Amino acid sequence: MPNRKVQAQRDLLKLKRSALLSQYRKAVDDLADENKKFPRLSAFLPQNSRPWIKSYLDYAFKRKHKFLSYPNGGDRGVYELAPTGSSQTVKLSIAGDWGTGTEEAWKVAYAISKSTPDYTVHLGDVYYVGDTSEVDENCLGQSAGGYQGVTWPRGSKGSFALNGNHEMYANGNAYFDKFLPALGIPSSRDKTQLASFFCLENDIWRILGLDTGYNSLGLPILGQIPLINQIPGVGADCKLEDALLNWLRTIVRPAERPRATILLTHHQYFSAFEGGYTRPAKQLMEFFPNQDLIWIWGHEHRCAVYGKYSDGAMNAYGRCQGHGGMPVDVKEPNQRARSALQYYDNRTYQRFDKLMVGFNGFVNLEIDGATATFDYRDLENKKLLVERFTVTAGKLAQTFVFVDPEMAKGPAAPTSQPEGKAVGV
């Protein structure tokens, strides 16, 4: 990628999930534009600290953006999952935690574009705080602060973005007012993405993008304090808004109109590496009685694939795809969901001093009749893992088609499959 000046990924290392710390890191980045280095301590000087502290306090104690839903007439957020032209296959490309403006994000976007998807979906998180300047630079390709902008790749039929906690660090204003109007289904009546949730469906499959980011912050300051944030109503639980649930109940009606379902959210339902957020799953149980789901999320900066698992609510095949642009965590599983872990990418992409980071990437999803094929790729467009789900009598059956030998095996990885070779085709 010659002659491109973009945000350096190493400058995003160890960014904690805190609105206050994200505002601070944004201030450090702004200082670097002038000084060509990252003088972290200078961000605490009186003349430099006031703006970012004020910005945090302004966002933390001001009302967040109104939650947007679909109008009573016109576009209701349910779209036909249809291929382009005479093809029988619908192609989607999905990435999470991509909005960093880094070279790695650019490479992922380029690889997605080469895949010529019908639809693209960003699973959420624009860094540092998802405000207007960052949406412009990291998602809409506008150059700023000496950096060249990076553009979220569009699908030939449409593009969507989910809401993440980093967008809500700026109260969701830029996400709802700037990013969503640039996306959507061009052939629809309104032509833009009107809300932070959507549905793509055909007679067999349904893809639901849902907003777990809107309620992902908890109370200002108290929501960031360990133990205190465990008190109900203080910490974040990522609950789904009533308007979204009513849309599911009255417009999508999944219990009355069942389909094989792929859920897309920013936050994880469960994890072998971190904690999970079970509140959305419990809210969704009424819509998917006794149904196994495929659930793709971001938030965690890694690529991981799970077998069927439940964390006290629905059964789901979890897929973590939060490695679109942020430095990727390289670590071994340690949470109870590790029993369901099948494969994860633990390769080292770069070393920053003593810290190792992994490979960024994305997933291509192809739907052809009763079969959905997931093709997991890294930022160099290298194929790492291919799996298929086939719907038979309303039930999902999973098969691994290809596994790169470098993919780390979890406890639930199949034992009889030849790695690196096509099987079951």
Image: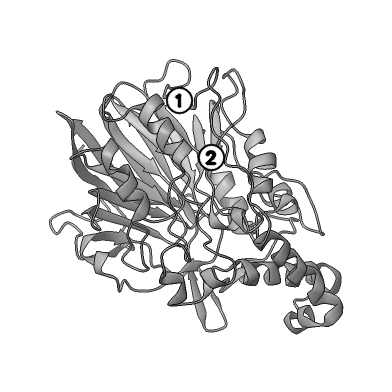
Residue 36 in sight here: no
Give 85 or 119, whichever is nearer the viewer: 119
Q: In this rendering, would 228 be left or right of 36?
A: left
Task: Give coordinates of residue 5: x percent, y percent.
Answer: 75, 59
Q: In this rendering, would 8 be left or right of 122?
A: right
Q: Quadrant of residue 245?
A: top left
Q: Amino acid at mark 1?
A: Val
Q: How many marks?
A: 2
| Label 1 element class | strand
Task: Give coordinates of residue 394: x percent, y percent.
Answer: 18, 30
On residue 196, the disc is 2
Task: Give coordinates of residue 264: x percent, y percent.
Answer: 41, 44
On residue 78, the disc is 1
| Label 2 element class | loop
Measured in 3D between alpha carbons, the distance from the residue under mark 2 to the one under mark 1, in whole angstroms, is 13 Å
Q: Which quadrant, please, contains the N terminus?
A: bottom right
Neighbour tally class for label 1: few under 14, some 14-19, many 20 plus, Cα within 10 Å: some
Q: Amino acid at mark 2?
A: Ser
Q: Quadrant of residue 128?
A: bottom right
